[in-house]
Image (cartoon, helix red, strand yellow):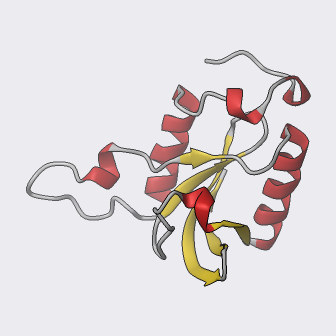
Amino acid sequence: MDPEVEPSAVELSEIDFDHEELRVFWDLARFHAKLNAAPTYFGPTTLESVPPPAWAFGDSAEESDAFVDTVLAEERGSTTATVADYAGDLPRAGVLSILCDGSGRPRALIEVSDVTVTGDDVTESFEVVYQA
């Protein structure tokens, strides 16, 4: 298990999102969100084998923590970025991801509910599917 890290002492770009805590969160989230309810005859699906991408919002751990607190309280949220930030791969409704706090701890499984492109801006709305 990773040692505790003071959130203000680490930049979000330095957070390792591929750790055991993320895998444990994904196993629980899949179960509670009923994403693995029916066994398949052809082996595990990609959704059962590969966790969705994990990410944190903001330029600092404090900003990320505040964003996560708001999302968890409202059970929904949104982000806005420029089209260029997506490098041609715009988000799609129904896509899952794992929202992490400023220390890289997974806090919520979210699903994109709506994507709106207005000029050069992309607004991605999402809903919380499961929270730790």
Figure quadrant of the N terminus: top right
- Residue furthest out toward the left: 42
Is 43 on the left or on the right of 23, as rendered?
left
Is 78 on the left or on the right of 49, as rendered?
right
Residue 78, quarter of picture = bottom right
Q: What residue do we see at 74% from left, 35% from top?
A: 12
Residue 111 is situated, as x and y percent measured from the top left of the image, at 54, 68
Q: How many marks?
A: 0
Depth order, front residue of 108/102: 102
Q: What residue do we see at 47% from left, 73% from top?
A: 92
Residue 30 is situated, as x and y percent measured from the top left of the image, at 44, 55
Residue 79 is situated, as x and y percent measured from the top left of the image, at 72, 67
Residue 124, quarter of picture = bottom right
Residue 21, quarter of picture = top right
Q: Is residue 121 above or below residue 64?
A: below
Q: What residue do we see at 84% from left, 38% from top?
A: 61
Q: Is residue 50 above or below residue 85?
A: above
Q: Is residue 121 above or below residue 19?
A: below
Is 49 on the left or on the right of 44, as rendered?
right
Depth order, front residue of 74/115: 115
Residue 60 is situated, as x and y percent measured from the top left of the image, at 86, 40
Is 47 on the left or on the right of 109, as rendered?
left
